[in-house]
Amino acid sequence: MSTTQTSAASSLKERIEKGFHDFGLFIFDNRIKTLLTMLIIIAGILSQLPKITVDTSSEGFLHKEDPILEVYNQFRAQFGRDDLILLAIKTPDVFTQSFLTKLKTLHKELEDNVPYLDEVNSLINARNTRGEGDNLIVEDLFEQWPDSPQAMQDKKEMTLSNKLYQNLYISEDARYTTIVINSIAYSPVGNEADIETGFDDSAETTTNEDAIFLTDAENSEMVKKVSAIVDKYKADDFVIYSAGAPIVVDAIKKSMQTDMQTSTKFALLSIALVLLILFRRVSGVLLPILVVILTLLSTFSFMAATGTALKLPTQILPSFLLAVGVAASVHLLSIFYHNFNRTGDKKNSIGYAMSHSGLAIAMTSLTTAASLLSFSMSEVAPIADLGKFAAAGVLVSLLYTLILLPALIALIPLKQKHDNSTQKRTAFMDSVLLKFAHISTKYSKQIIAAAAILFFVAIFGLLKISFFHDPLKWLPETWETRQATELLDVEMKGTGVIEVVIDTGKKNGLYDPKVIEALAKLHASIDKLSMDGMYVGKTISLIDILKESNRALHQNKDEFYTPPTERDLIAQEFLLFENSGSDDLENLVDSQFSKARFTIKTPWMDAARNTKFIHEIERQFKETLGDTATASATGMGSLFGRTMDAAINSTKISYLVAAGVITIMMILLLGNVKLGLVSMIPNLLPIIISLSVMGYFNMPLDMFTMLIGSIAIGLVVDDTIHFLHNFRRYHHKYNDVNKAVEETLLSTGRAIFVTTIVLCIGFFIFMTADMNNVFRFGLITGTTIILALLSDLLLAPALMKVMYEKHKV
């Protein structure tokens, strides 16, 4: 860079800093007007806060226009929800009068009292298809109650021999029986005409754009009522386990709400304590806390105003914004108090603090916002929301710090402090910072070499990183919901489902013997499918109905437990079953008999294995159906897989965008391409090391830990900006690298040290969370920030030493 260019850049910087100085003086002179204006604006923003909502549903992870979600919504509109509540009751003997009577009472109470209910199914009303002469009888299994030991034994044998019931209503060893609870697909609020279209020729097979599916709040209400009823029936000989997607989602939601409240409280208390130790002033505690609380409430108000719900990844917003907002306030207040204690001139101290730190605070906020905005393009909806609103929160914090905070300082009475203990603490910190300055400049080459070695070691760790998305594993192993789900995955061969929709493309296409033959083959092959620890526990489709009906119409002989092979017989058996009074067929085919639902019961699975499993299922369907029909997988399993794929793709893009945008901003801020590029080294190295640690210790990247890179780079670059901003000022003044490093660390080093503590608290607080993924996110991000501090105190000065002494910068 030429002398002229350097001079021009310095002149521009000086003009900007003078602008901040004058702006600080303007706020002081107009402090009441400024405060009233800000309060009116803030009141208007906060008026939207009551509209905030929460959504922890699996479909909430995807954008409304995502093709996978659109297919799932079409499935729900046609066939209803696939995510069921599964109650499994363990007892020494299912087939006793006392147990079955209690089961029947529980079944009835659930039917009568659970809101948003579609149907309840158990052994009590399990489908029992039989023939009497030429008549097809479809009745409840316990429609005729066994009133004698022999009748009970007959009922037991009938139950255990029925293939439909096995792993659906009763376990293979008959120690567990289940109650399966289905909710309605649509919310009843405003959707009265869409709740149930029935098995009607006029029923639409596409989703109603104005209709609202059952909401997250309604799901929680349903789960709460089920849990309350279940608790009344639990006993030593009637042990009840609750599982299924609605139960897991509700447990995650409760954990999220509890963790958010706990982390926010701890963060506030911890940060307040640090501020008290740092400033030894009530104003030094209350003013930053007030700024960040208003920032947080304003951010949530923006979410409410735009109809954006709080979702799982956005639960990190409170602690994140608290830490980031306080860090900005600390830089401004530390300079202000230092100058005010020295001069006693509040007005000029505000101007000086704004001049000294205003530009750096603005740039750090912009770089943090830029890194967060890299998430806004994410294919995962809540991560995109996090990027947009966290960035908005950072910018709101910037405005409140540079406008509201100086106005409040100007209004409140302050006294000069000449505290010997403060001077002693300052002297001690100064001595520590000077040691870092001497080490970094004296051993600059060795420090750079050590950093290079760490980088290459870290690369191998990055290659070991795996991806993982399993909301169930977020819950602690000791939680009842996780234990119940894992138990029933073994005992009932699964609590999750994969849905496959078969489309023949024509009316009555399901009467085609070729289609029925292909589906029968798929029943046999899919039932045996197992790969990479995944397996199929059960398959359910219209083939079951055809087999049962065909056997019943052939004198109930087991050798006829096969689907008919002629078109007319297939159509006739469907018609007879419809006329029997059972509505089970409505849940399996559309009204035109052109589409069918094929349900595959599986254990709860992580998204990576699930995606491979679904691909194999789709391959088998395509191969077996040929050109007779098409098949598409959907359901919760498909959503998990899509979420994981979207997260991986979006993370790659967000990392590149964040690094690229921040690099450009650093170059513009520093006015030097070479210096801007070099400045990214102490920012990227801590992130690379932290991610490599995850690889070496087999900690997978999940929906939360994927955020570390882009969030961390936006945070760690802040201290680098403050360091380089002041380093260049002092180097320009003294033309001596060692002196510039010393003065930089003595002036801004304290604030860097304190903001690091504040940020670490903000993230280490997440280690108090119940959910494992949030714990890991807090641990790794907090560690990254500590590594970044060391990088700014050692590596950044070392790089400046080498660059400025061997090259003309």
Image (spheres, rainbow, N blue to C red):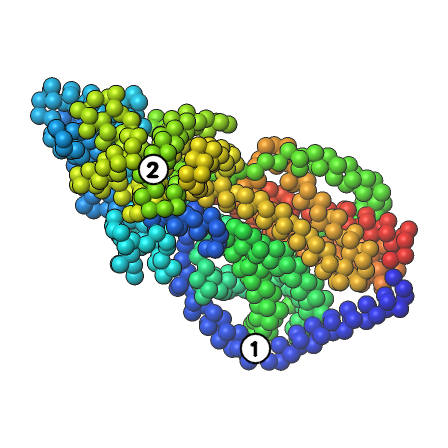
Say if mark 2 contacts mark 1, CB within 8 Å. Answer: no
The residue that appears at 81% across and 67% down in the rendered structure is 9
Identify which amino acid the numbered label 1 is placed on.
Thr
Determine whether, in the image, residue 690 is placed left or right of residue 594. right
Image quadrant of residue 448?
top right
- Decide which of 127, 565 is in the foreground and name it: 565
User: Residue 256 appears at what percent x and percent y?
Assistant: 44, 47
Q: What is the x, y in percent for residue 96? A: 16, 24
Q: Is residue 692 above or below residue 304?
A: above
Instruction: Classify mark 1: helix, strand or loop.
Output: helix
Question: Could you say which quadrant of the image residue 417 lies in?
Answer: bottom right
The kind of secondary structure element at disc 2 is loop
Picture coordinates of residue 273, whole percent (x, y): 55, 53
Q: Position of residue 267 (x, y in %)?
A: 52, 52
Q: Is residue 510 above or below residue 166?
A: below
Residue at (84%, 70%) from the top-left corner? 8
Q: Amino acid at mark 2?
A: Asp
Which of 55/543 is in front?
543
Task: Give the residue at x 38% y 43%.
Answer: 504
Indicate which disc residue 512 carries.
2
Q: Quadrant of the C terminus?
A: bottom right
Residue tagged 1: 34
Left or right for 199, reference 460? left
Residue 316 in sight in this render: no
